[in-house]
Amino acid sequence: MDRRVASCEETSFSLRTRALKLALLVLCATGLLGIAAHLPAFYGLARAAAQEPAGKAAAQGPASEEDCESGTIYVEYQKKAECLAVYVHGRSPGGTKAIFFLGGDLSDEQLRKKRPQFAALATLIGEAARAFQHDKVPIILLARPGRFGSTGDHRLRHGEVEYRHVGQAIEKLVAGFKLRKVALVGGSGGSSAIMGALSLGMKAGNCILAASGGYEHPEQLKAKLREYEAVGRVLDKGQKEDWQKALFSHRKAVTGISRDISRRIFLIGDTIDPYTPFAQQLRYAQLLQVTGHNVRMIEARSRRGDDHSFTYESLRAAASCLSGESDSRIVRLLGGIDRTP
């Protein structure tokens, strides 16, 4: 495991714009980088955030583990390799527990922009820092392929390969940091990735807090294809089949989630979420329950004003879960109500 860490002076040289330099100075002045730079595997916050969207080389992935830069972790599945960026916040000397966080998707419009997605990463870092200051549980931000310094093509998301890579990275980090108790926290597409990795056999994760996740991607694709056809954008049968094969089916794969591991699963959703319908999350909670898992479906209101985001609350609730707090305590932290079927 790489043991270089970043300081404000070390990372500032790579910033490409005055706006990014100012943003880094704000992070340094508020102490957020200081919090973030305590554990191994954190390197080049500003450099990674300032990267242009992945070009052809980055999208193709590394040829070998040696091609991965410091602060990334090498993963490979079916000869498709990536270097996933890792940002670690907080230190717990001798500690054996941590919280992993995976963020959501970028829209097609955001992917087309040439400017770096620094603001989104800075927001995540700020919320992770706030949560760590309160609970003192280290937080590991794992960037999905094509995001925040990771190689890969973010357009090729929500398939088995992405979820295999995510699961492999988490298990490598758990082993490398010698962690015994782990919480996995996701937001939107990050929640889908976590539950997908679990469905594919990932063993890590004592506490799962999956907010605003999408678990019916193949079904949503069929609806989208009908919309295309209604406006005359008809795809041939081969294109439709390719799209449907590429997307992971959480519903079909749910039996792959191990029941041999004692874990608590909390699904969190807003009933007026415009991106991932609450009813879809409720159906997934019912499916998890039927297959024998300890799951709670929490209805809550997003405090971000977007009816979708629960990052800070989920991180706080994850720390409480790792400490053995009751379900009712966790529901209160999320400001929600238990809607478990």
Image (spheres, rainbow, N blue to C red):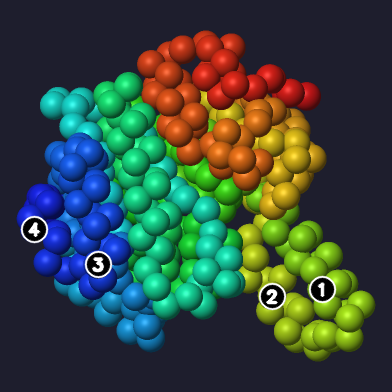
Closer to viewer: mark 3 or mark 4: 3
Whether the residues at callouts 4 and 2 have beta carbons within 8 Å, the answer is no
Give the residue pinned by disc 4: 10
**Secondary element at tag 3:** helix
Q: Residue at x 40, y 47 (%)?
A: 123
Residue type indicated by callout 1: Leu
Q: Is residue 110 above or below residue 257?
A: below
Specify which label sits upstream in the sequence, 2 or 1: 1
**C-alpha distance separating marks 3 and 1:** 43 Å
Label drawn at residue 243:
2
Q: Is residue 185 left or right of residue 31?
A: right
Closer to viewer: mark 2 or mark 1: 1
Give the residue pinned by disc 1: 225
Would you call the spot at circle 2 few (<14 residues within 10 Å), some (14-19), or many (20 or more)? few
Q: Can residue 20 be seen from the camera position used here?
A: yes
**C-alpha distance separating marks 4 and 1:** 48 Å
Q: Residue at x 66, y 50 (%)?
A: 214
Closer to viewer: mark 2 or mark 3: 3
Q: Nearer the viewer, residue 283 or 276?
A: 276
